[in-house]
Amino acid sequence: MERTWKRRNYFIKKELQGKYIFSFFLFVITGSIVFTLIFSLLSSDTLTVVYENNKLQIGKTPLILLKEILSAHWIFIIAGGLLVVILAMFLTHRFAGPIYRFERSVEELIKGNFAFQIHLRTKDEGKELAEKINELITVIASDVREMRHITLEMDRKLSEAYSAVKQSEKDKETAVDIEIVSDLNRRMHDILQKFLIKDDK
């Protein structure tokens, strides 16, 4: 089966990726706050001297540190936040893409299409699951192929038996039974024909 879906962007599953990106962002912010609090507690009994714009300031280290971070380094905080969001988007893409691929593949399987294999990119997550699904597709396709062959062989044998029985007037009931079995076999064959496997292409 030729793939009908392509990953054109890094933001594939918006809800899933958005949740993880927000979680990464919160994790970094929380980590920064915790680090600042720990540093403040460890340096609460110390003084810091700051020389800025020809002014000398003396104050408690935690307050001076917080003031400096908020006033002078806000652009680094914003840039760091954006960097975290971008990195999280690239990282989540490695598993959001395969999840999207698995969903589309299951949709194809539900439609009865077993003429494809799942191919993931080198750095994508979920390769083991893709291999297992591919193995399942191969097994089912092989079974469908074998069942089709059996139904065709049964149809041939039933036709021969029906022809032989029909010539004899004694076996009318047997002829009717053979017709019923033939009809059931044709129905089974029709169901199997709905599945698309590689040999059909």
Image (cartoon, rainbow, N blue to C red):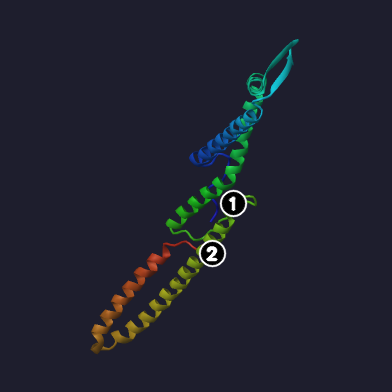
Counting from the top left corner in percent of width and height, residue 140 is at 48, 66
- Name the residue at 59% across, 39% down: 88
Of residue 43 and residue 80, the one placed in the foreground of this image is 43
> Residue 138 at what x, y percent from top left?
52, 65
Please, what secondary structure does the residue beneath circle 2 have?
helix
Which residue position holds label 1?
125
49 vs 186: above or below = above
Q: Residue at left 33%, top 86%? A: 164
The residue located at (43%, 76%) in the rendering is 150
Label 2 packing within 10 angstroms: few (<14), some (14-19), many (20+): few
Please state which amino acid type lies under the numbered disc 1: Glu
Instruction: Give the Cα distance between marks 2 and 1.
Output: 18 Å
Drawn side of residue 176 relative to residue 122, left or right: left
Answer with left or right where residue 118 lies relative to residue 49: left
Residue type, mark 2 in image: Glu
**Is 3 displayed left or right of 61 in the figure?**
left
Instruction: Give whichever of 164, 195 is nearer the camera.
Output: 195
User: What residue is shown with label 2?
Assistant: 135
In this view, 178 is above or below 66:
below
SS at mark 1?
Answer: loop
The answer to which of 187 and 168 lies nearer the viewer is: 187
Q: Position of residue 184 (x, y in %)?
A: 32, 72
